[in-house]
Amino acid sequence: MQKPIYKRVVLKISGEALAGNKGFGIDQDTLNSIADQIKEIHDLNVEIAIVVGGGNIWRGRDYKEMDRATADYMGMLATVINALALQDALENREVQTRVQTAIEMREIAEPYIRRKAIRHLEKGRVVIFAAGTGNPFFSTDTAAALRAAEIDAEVILLAKKVDGVYDSDPVINPTAQKFTSLDYIDVLNKSLGVMDSTATSLCMDNKIPIIVFGINTPGNIKKVIMGENIGTTVKGS
Ligand code: GTP
């Protein structure tokens, strides 16, 4: 039988991906489909840590009149809502999970403790990291890069609504070309918008590859785990 090529991964799910076609909030069918896909790779004994965004509920950077730090904290709270929804959907599928938050809210979830997170992964639990890095001015992509480095994940699977990295926005430009692979430095120099520069630099410094792919097609996470080239891989040369 074919085996997964990764043992421990960080799966970054954008908040927008949870909204499906609703554009806002959480679409239950989309949430179910994502949870099914996560279960599929969990059943292959892949250790999965999830970092979830919050853009389906609140996008701090869109509120230019608001104090940036306050807007970012509101975004971090949005990621906690998404994390609890994912936890619920996964546990409905008999997948054991633990939510850890970067800002303490112990009545709701465990605080982030690196060694405990690793222990949970070793025990086969899916760990969902919420509240970003706990600091304003950092994105949840940076949280994914940071947590991946901390827990020694082999790769970041960057699950998006679009199916890879393009030379221009494929939603606006129908002739946009998809890259199959890119160097970190190209992402930084060409401002390709895969990840922000802080997150990309952190991955570059720690040699963590990023695979960008579309999560809205069922089965895609498994394809990536099995080594199929379906999106765009960002790594060093
Ligand atoms: P092991 O130590 O490997 O057995 O892990 P465990 O998570 O099963 O043990 P623990 O006793 O730490 O946790 C039991 C349950 O309590 C789990 O569902 C945890 O997510 C939850 N839990 C642990 N710490 C906290 C906390 O600070 N706040 C909240 N809300 N739940 C917690």
Image: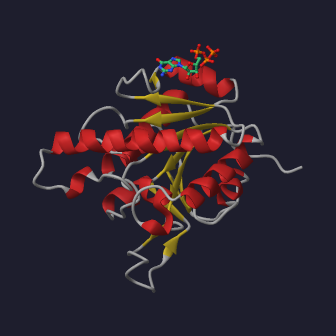
Asked whether, in this view, residue 56 is left or right of residue 74, the answer is right
- The residue lying at 67 percent from left, 24 percent from top is 122
Q: How many numbered dots are placed on residues in this image?
A: 0
Instruction: Judge whether 25 appears above or below 204 on screen.
Output: below
Please state which of residues 85 and 156 is positioned toward the viewer in this rendering: 85
Asked whether, in this view, residue 56 is left or right of residue 152, the answer is left
**Residue 63 seen in this snapshot:** yes
- The residue lying at 70 percent from left, 43 percent from top is 93
Instruction: Judge whether 104 appears above or below 24 on screen.
Output: above
- The residue lying at 42 percent from left, 42 percent from top is 81
Residue 233, percent from left and from top: 55, 58
Question: For residue 48, which quarter of the picture?
Answer: top right
- The residue lying at 36 percent from left, 61 percent from top is 193
**Residue 5 seen in this snapshot:** no
Please state which of residues 224 and 162 is positioned toward the viewer in this rendering: 162
Residue 168, percent from left and from top: 38, 75
Instruction: Judge whether 32 appears above or below 190 on screen.
Output: above
